[in-house]
Amino acid sequence: MENTRDIVAIFFVAGPLSCLISASVGVSTLYFNGLAPASDLWFTVWNWWAGNTLGVLVALPLCLTWLLRNQSPWNTRPVVLGVPMLIALAVIATGYWAVSKWEMAEQETALRNHAERLIKRLEQRFIAHEEALAALKRLMKVTPDMNYAQFEYFTRIAHRKVKKQSKEL
């Protein structure tokens, strides 16, 4: 780990390659256990790989700087490499926090919109049921001597209308 070639090889080849293997195995495990749908596989692999690769690209230099701080040429690298990587870590953490807040707001908005649509549909269904009950009440008032067959006939028609209206919503 003393020459540039070794550092570049680990930094750009071994790190991202091992992260690709990790993402592939992890997402495959999720898929075969029914926890990740087939339609999301590539997106999930990409997210897994990107997160792990960013972690390696930030954490590896910091760990090497700290672990090898007493060896030459690493004894001069804490300032040269450590400080910029700590700044990069802070920027990435801040970006992650900001994106996380944005995503949470998007999810809350989507949930609120879905809830509002559901409320409207339920209100319309309740109105349909209330109208059917009001019609039944009026029928009972105007036809107090109604027999069972007539009552069943009317309620069957009213039920079909309410059911049809509910399906249309």
Image (spheres, rainbow, N blue to C red):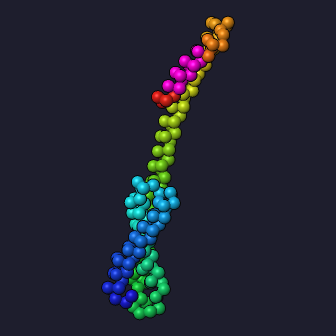
Q: Looking at the image, which residue is at 36% across and 83% down?
A: 7
x and y percentages locating residue 69 in the rendered image:
46, 88
Which residue of the protein is positioned furthest toward the left in this rendering? 5
Which residue of the protein is positioned furthest toward the front in this rendering? 149
Which residue of the protein is positioned furthest toward the bottom in this rendering? 72
Per the picture, the main secondary structure of the magenta-coloured stretch is helix
Q: Looking at the image, which residue is at 34% across and 76% down?
A: 12
Q: Looking at the image, which residue is at 48% across and 61% down?
A: 32
x and y percentages locating residue 89 in the rendered image:
44, 71
Query: Residue 154: which quarter of the image?
Result: top right
Judge left or right: residue 137 versus residue 51: right
x and y percentages locating residue 145 in the rendered image:
67, 6
Q: Looking at the image, which residue is at 48% across and 84% down?
A: 66
Query: Residue 147: which quarter of the image?
Result: top right
Q: Is residue 58 visible?
A: no
Q: Give above or below for 34 relative to 116.
A: below
Query: Residue 139: which quarter of the image?
Result: top right
Q: Give above or below for 167 relative to 46.
A: above
In the depicted view, which residue is nearer to us: 80 or 140?
140
x and y percentages locating residue 99 in the rendered image:
44, 58
- The answer to whether residue 158 is magenta is yes
Q: Is residue 121 visible?
A: yes
Bounds of the magenta span? 153-164
In the depicted view, which residue is nearer to us: 67 or 40?
40
Q: What count of labels does the image hold?
A: 0
- The answer to whether residue 114 is magenta is no
Q: Quadrant of the N terminus?
A: bottom left
Q: Give above or below for 151 relative to 78.
A: above
